[in-house]
Amino acid sequence: MTRAEWIEAGYLFAALCFILSLKLLNSPATARRGNWLAMLGMAVALAVTFLNEAIRHYEWIVVGVLLGSIVGFVAARRVAMTAMPQMVALFNGVGGGAVALVSLSEYRNAVNAEMSLPWVGLITSVLSAIIGSLSFSGSLIAFGKLQELITTRPLTYKGQRESNLFLLFSLVVLAGVLWTGLPSVWLFCAMIGLALLTGILFVLPIGGADMPVVISLLNSFTGVAAGLAGFVLGNTALLTGGALVGASGLILTFLMCSAMNRSLENVLFGAFGAEGGTMATSLSSGKSIKSYTVEDVAIMFSNAENVVIVPGYGMAVAQAQHVVKELTTKLQERGIDVKFAIHPVAGRMPGHMNVLLAEADVSYDLLYDLEEINPLFPQTDVVLVVGANDVVNPAARYDKNSPIYGMPILDVDRARSVVVIKRSMARGFAGVDNELFTMDNTSMVFGDAKAVITKLISAVNQY
């Protein structure tokens, strides 16, 4: 085989690895193997790239790979599970920025060499620069919101839509000028600057509650930009990998919107949560609640035959997954059937709860999706809600004035008894009261989830 054939064979192998890894990532039981397969594909793609005779400075690639590997390894080891969405946003932004720089470099090289890029190459260079830049700046804003470096509330202003439309129109005009064949690196840089500004102004008006959807959409953008860059560079692995990321990110975006019963337009332009519900501290309805002690809950467990645990962001914040696992084992030792109910958008991103529970070695067999668990709630003795809020609010079924109306929820209110562990009566991301808390079959236990469940484990031993 020639050198070029080895390269193409390596890229084909990498593409197959990427496709198979996506299939394996579909299930928690096979996700780890999927990650390893994706890493193998990426390693092979990198290795055969070094066979490319057109590369003149291998040392810079080695330095880039080493630096990226070190930063990625350290970040992945140190980041808290609750901060995983921020890290995804940051890494996604870096990917988008890299694509924009590659496009700029290719365009500048062509201009300096007084070469004219073929029209297909010119179109893809401009598009990948725009999309990559927009994804870079938008992802950094998403990171800032999730990390609470900037306010998580939607930042809206008068004339916001008009100014965004003007920015898009300006981008189209600049792209059109470059597509006519006018060679200008400065104009290309100006277009990148405008795309960066567009990414910032498009994400700032979106609330923190919708950041997972935004990150997924921006991840799709980065994939598309990378695929276009692969077309420019003639790199099959980059083209295939970018297409897979773009398509899967877009599918995930629409699945998340569907899980919240909202359109993508509403997520991007609806300024959801602008009224700042997380700052509320009491129920506006004035209805009373029942506050229980851990001993009361332990007695309830002693009389239960089956228990469903609903994990939420509060569990993630408290890092309570390990004590939840310990409690599960205690209940199972007493002959109680224990299941976990996982809402599609529980936590800060899809799969967040699955990853947390997997970290604590909770068996995959105990995890039930919304469609599987909802029919079982009427026969459930006790539901333990750990830090979840909007995804268990019954008002989503009927209150047409509620911002979460129509969102599929976990029907925990239909269980015989519900215990909710929360720090306070603060509202969820949607900014609305949760009527579950005032229902006759619901009891509240206030406190940090990890501390409460630790006490609950001790109390269970006494009854």
Image (cartoon, rainbow, N blue to C red):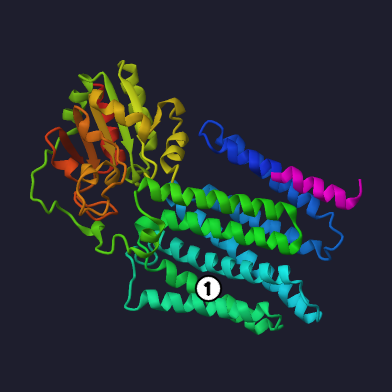
Give yes or no for residue 2 being in the magenta stretch.
yes
Q: Residue at x 36, y 44 (%)?
A: 346
Q: Nearer the viewer, residue 247 or 414?
A: 247
Q: Residue at x 42, y 48 (%)?
A: 256
Type of residue at label 1?
A: Leu
**Which quadrant does the N terminus fall into?**
top right
Q: Position of residue 23 (x, y in %)?
A: 59, 37
Q: Is residue 49 left or right of residue 130?
A: right
Q: Position of residue 96 (x, y in %)?
A: 59, 63
Q: Position of residue 390 (x, y in %)?
A: 27, 47
Q: Is residue 355 left or right of residue 207?
A: right
**Residue that carries the numbered disc 1 in the rendered image:** 196
Q: Nearer the viewer, residue 416 or 327?
A: 416
Q: How many marks?
A: 1
Q: Is any part of residue 349 visible from this angle?
A: no
Q: Position of residue 213 (x, y in %)?
A: 43, 54
* Vertical position of residue 123 compared to residue 228: above or below: below
| Bounds of the magenta segment | 1-15
Q: Is residue 69 left or right of residue 398?
A: right
- Give the main secondary structure, helix, strand or loop, of the magenta stretch: helix
